[in-house]
Amino acid sequence: MSEHIIQLDKVFKIYGKGNTEVRALDGVDLQIDAGEFVAVMGPSGSGKSTCMNIIGCLDVPTSGAYRFCGLDVSKFDRDELALLRRKYLGFVFQSFNLMARTSALDNVELPLVYQGVGKAERRKRALAALDSVGLADRAHHTPSQLSGGQQQRVAIARALVSNPTLLVADEPTGNLDTTTTQEVMTLLEDLNRDQGLTIVMVTHEPDVALHAKRAVWFVDGDVRKDGTPEEVLK
Amino acid sequence: MSYFDVFRMALGAIFNNAVRSILTALGIVIGVASVIAMVHLGQAATLSVTQQIESMGSNLLIVQSGTRGRGPGGTRQSSESLTGADAVAIRNEIDGVTVAPVVSSNATLVWSAKNYPAAIYGTTLDFFKIRNWQVTSGRIMEESEMSTGRSVCVIGTTIVTEVFGTQDPLGATLRLGRTSCQVVGVMDSKGATFGEDLDNTVIMPLKTVQQRILGSTDVKQIYVSADDAAILPRVRTELESLMRQRRGITGKKEDDFNIRDMAEMAAALKGTTATLTMLLGAIAAVSLLVGGIGIMNIMLVSVTERTREIGIRIAIGATVRDVLTQFLVEAITLSMLGGLLGVALGIVGTYFATKQMNLPFVLTPEVMLIGFGFSVLIGVVFGFVPARKAAQMNPVEALRHE
């Protein structure tokens, strides 16, 4: 049995047919183990976002195998993928993607609502998650009443509340200034170090990538460099 | 995910967009309200017509001289009039009936400096028994006045207010045309039947009207009331054969008179108004349908507008069913709220409309339940398309949506 959390074997993602065929992923092989903090980098159009969508079980490969925790999910249907995401995955997006006009607490509770957790338990766990990102005192603020950094921390709390196996972060600092970028990255580093949370993060900022333990560099739909961030960025 | 949570989410979405939600639900509100008001009004009209006919006496047969078939080109051929002798014969030959011959005319009443047009009826004392008419002051005519053809009369309340005002009509002498009569009684109020004000009538002895006003011994109608509804069919057949015999109609020749059966008329009118009620309800249902399309329209816009939200929900782990249920419940909740408001508005509308039209205000729970049920059904039917659109979104694209 494989000990890798993520194992991509010859993964292809092809859009269109014939002359207009685009190979977003061109036979990617990639393994990520439990407890890793990986920065996925590369120029735009290199396939890093497509790869993230597959790793995050939002999309399936055209061909090739994707094993998540030893499970081949490349042939899963919509609902099987949804149930998998619900249980094992947490998402952080560039544009935060919080529900507007909904309090931070309700936002964090949302994944638990879909898991069918009872109201009291939900509240307790959501408050704990908000506390872990240092926003317990903002529980009843709506996103529009929070700063960008705070919103992203709420989003991280929402991703963490269901105790995921894997945290998928898509340009988590893309909309943040330097100070709040620092804040959010420190938080992710702490989570990785203290709780052993596996994190896969797409970024194009070298400064951000340096917070990770490992970096992979995509070009034209395949991994060209793999190593520590320092090595890859050289 | 529990249904309570789904419902809470739906309410949240509805109240987050309160103004738009109200405008959307308005279509359903008006649809349900008009269905309820229309059907109730139709039922009130049916009830009112039935009551009016029943007030005429449900065991009543009215014999009238009629046409003998149709002449060339469909013109009516007049037939022989009825006479007082016919009435006497009916009373003597048929068991268990009360008989009243009736003549009628119109005249302008003159009293003091006032004049007023009214209907004049000449009849016998049994007429009061058959129609169940009573006097509230004074008395009805006496047998002796009937047989001698004295000029006395009983008047309706409209005449009292229009002609006498606050003065006491009893004992006054009314002039009608070339003759005059003394008021001996005032009848209780009857209201109107088929647009005819029953209180605008003067009732006089049959003989008096025949001799002094009409100058003829003819009778216009003969009221035949069976003592019991059970014997009505027998009375009817006997009446028909008696009249045929008296008028010398034999074999397969058609009747030259007709017998109106009040119970039959009631049934026929009931059928007509019931059909009209259905028609009104159907027209109103169209507006309900339009309201449903409004809901679908807004829900489709809402789904597009909330693409990102749907993307987040799917990414977080919402299944097709979760998203479908959420939007379906939202549409149903919206149409249900509209339905409730519509029922309330429909009741208020019915109340004012019946008051305006002088109809009885009666509410039927079934109508309200059906109206409300339809609003829910419309939520399901028209909510489905937008909900399915939401549920089948691709999360990757939905999350990228601006």
Image: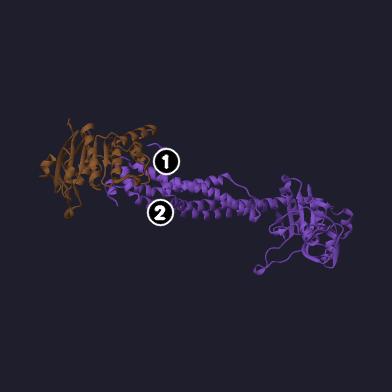
Judging by colour alone, the chain drawn in brown in this rendered image is A
Q: Position of residue B173 (x, y in %)?
A: 86, 62
Q: Residues within 10 Å of mark 2 (few under 14, many from 20)?
A: some
Amino acid found under the numbered disc labelled 2:
Asn
Can residue A59 be seen in this snapshot? no
Residue located farthest toward the top when viewing the structure as drawn: A1
What residue appears at the point 69 percent right and 52 percent down from the top-left corner? B53
- Disc 2 designates what residue? B297
Q: Left or right of A71: which side holds B214? A: right
Q: Left or right of A31: which side holds B92? A: right
- Asked whether the residues under marks 1 and 2 belong to the same chain, the reply is yes
Given residues B317 and B214, the one toward you in this image is B317
| Number of the label disc, if any, that sits on residue B8 | 1
Q: What separation in Å lies between label 1 and label 2 (alpha carbons)?
A: 23 Å
Instruction: Examine the rendered structure and indicate whether residue B170 appears above or below residue A197.
Output: below
Judging by colour alone, the chain drawn in purple in this rendered image is B
Q: Report the chain holding disc 2.
A: B
Given residues A11 and B11, the one toward you in this image is B11
Given residues A178 and A107, the one toward you in this image is A178
Q: Position of residue B10 (x, y in %)?
A: 41, 44
Q: Left or right of B129: which side holds A36? A: left
Residue mark closest to the camera, 1 vs 2? 1
Q: Report the chain holding disc 1.
A: B
Amino acid found under the numbered disc labelled 1:
Arg
Q: Secondary structure at mark 1?
A: helix
What residue appears at the point 15 percent right and 39 percent down from the top-left corner? A214
Instruction: Examine the rendered structure and indicate whether residue A142 appears above or below residue B75.
Output: above
Q: Position of residue A160 (x, y in %)?
A: 28, 36
Q: Position of residue A59 (x, y in %)?
A: 24, 44
Residue A192 placement: quadrant: top left
